[in-house]
Image (cartoon, rainbow, N blue to C red):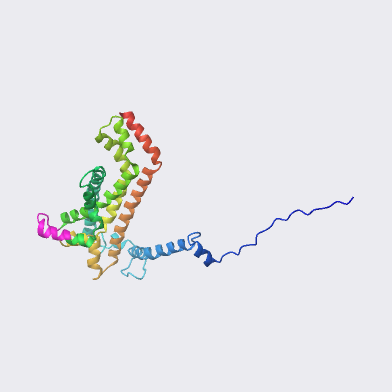
Amino acid sequence: MSQVVTAAPTERTRPAQPRPGRIGGWLRNPWGRPRFLPMFALLYMVWSLAPVAIAVLFSFNSGRSRSAWQGFSIRWYWGDPSLSVWHDPALRSALAQSLKLASLTMLISVPLGVAFAIGLDRWRGRGSGTANFLMLFSFVTPELIMGVSLFLLFVKLFTLVRLGTTAQLLGLITFEIAYPVIIVRARLLSIGKEYEEAAMDLGASPTKALRMVLLPLLLPAIFASFALVFADSIDDFIIVRYLSAGAATETIPVKIYSTARGSPTPALNALASIMLFSTVIAVTLALIVYRSLTRGERKGEGMALRDFAAQI
């Protein structure tokens, strides 16, 4: 008997779709495989950081040339007996003035900004919108207009404060206080009011809840504000220049501007490098503290609330 052998049904295959070319695929989905974006970011970083790196490099040049490398030395920081930053009274005065103004501005404007941010966050009723606008007005005002306005204020109206360190400090505080207000208010919106309300439900007074619950939760924003205000104040030029009273109150940016067109030496590079190092150190420390405070944030908030409840 003959057997009929049937062939297994063959699976119908779809015709292979032609792969789009590189340009065609990129036009269809430009963000699918953005290979060019890392290269673009790298080129931008090189373009923006190369001048800074060259200036820092030549601050360690042993000779006076600012274009030909003559060997490594710290002559312009310390070694030269008359032209180095440490031994030149004018450069040393500019460095001290910059550090003093930046530190005082940071220590005054950040606590005031934290207090204003908490007050604005709790203000309900008439005038709250106007108060928010006025508090952020300096943030959106061009610094040139702010500098000219403060100059006219201290010269024509508020004559009790003369141009100099005090006027520079008041001007920087006026301009910088908006930064901690914005940063702390953003933090307040992110953490909400549940923790503070829970503390008051457990019997804490509003002041105790503020001190033991809210302020610890605001520490990351507070440290970020410290770093931002210090970094922005130490290299401020316009406000400090308008409110300066002469060579004794010149800061690093003003000193570099006033002497760069004359007979500059690599000591100016060293002075600018010190300002850069100070800013980088401040921002790095703030970033380390911020990450340590926000690591396991939810867990930390719950433990802090339980510890607070145990103390009550």
Q: Is residue 255 visible?
A: yes
Q: Quadrant of residue 67?
A: bottom left
User: Dividing the picture into quarters, in which one does residue 53 lie?
Assistant: bottom left
Viewer-nearest residue: 32 or 308: 32
Judged left or right of residue 99, residue 160 is left
Residue 124 placement (x, y as % from top left): 24, 43
Horizontal and vertical percent position of residue 91 = 23, 61
Kindly report the secondary structure that dominates the magenta region of the rendered protein.
Answer: helix
Q: Residue 114: percent from the left, percent from the top?
A: 25, 45
| For residue 286, side relative to residue 205 (left or right) | right
Q: Is residue 242 above or below residue 170?
A: below
The answer to whether residue 160 is magenta is yes
Q: Quadrant of the C terminus?
A: top left
Residue 89 visible to the viewer: no
Q: Residue at x 34, y 34 (%)?
A: 305
Q: Is residue 103 above or below residue 28?
A: above
> Which sits in the foreground, 153 or 106?
153
Q: Which residues are magenta?
A: 149-163
Q: Is residue 166 magenta?
A: no
Q: Residue at x 16, y 56 (%)?
A: 167
Place of residue 140 in the rendered image (x, y in percent of width and height, measured from the top left): 25, 57
Q: Is residue 20 left or right of residue 186?
A: right
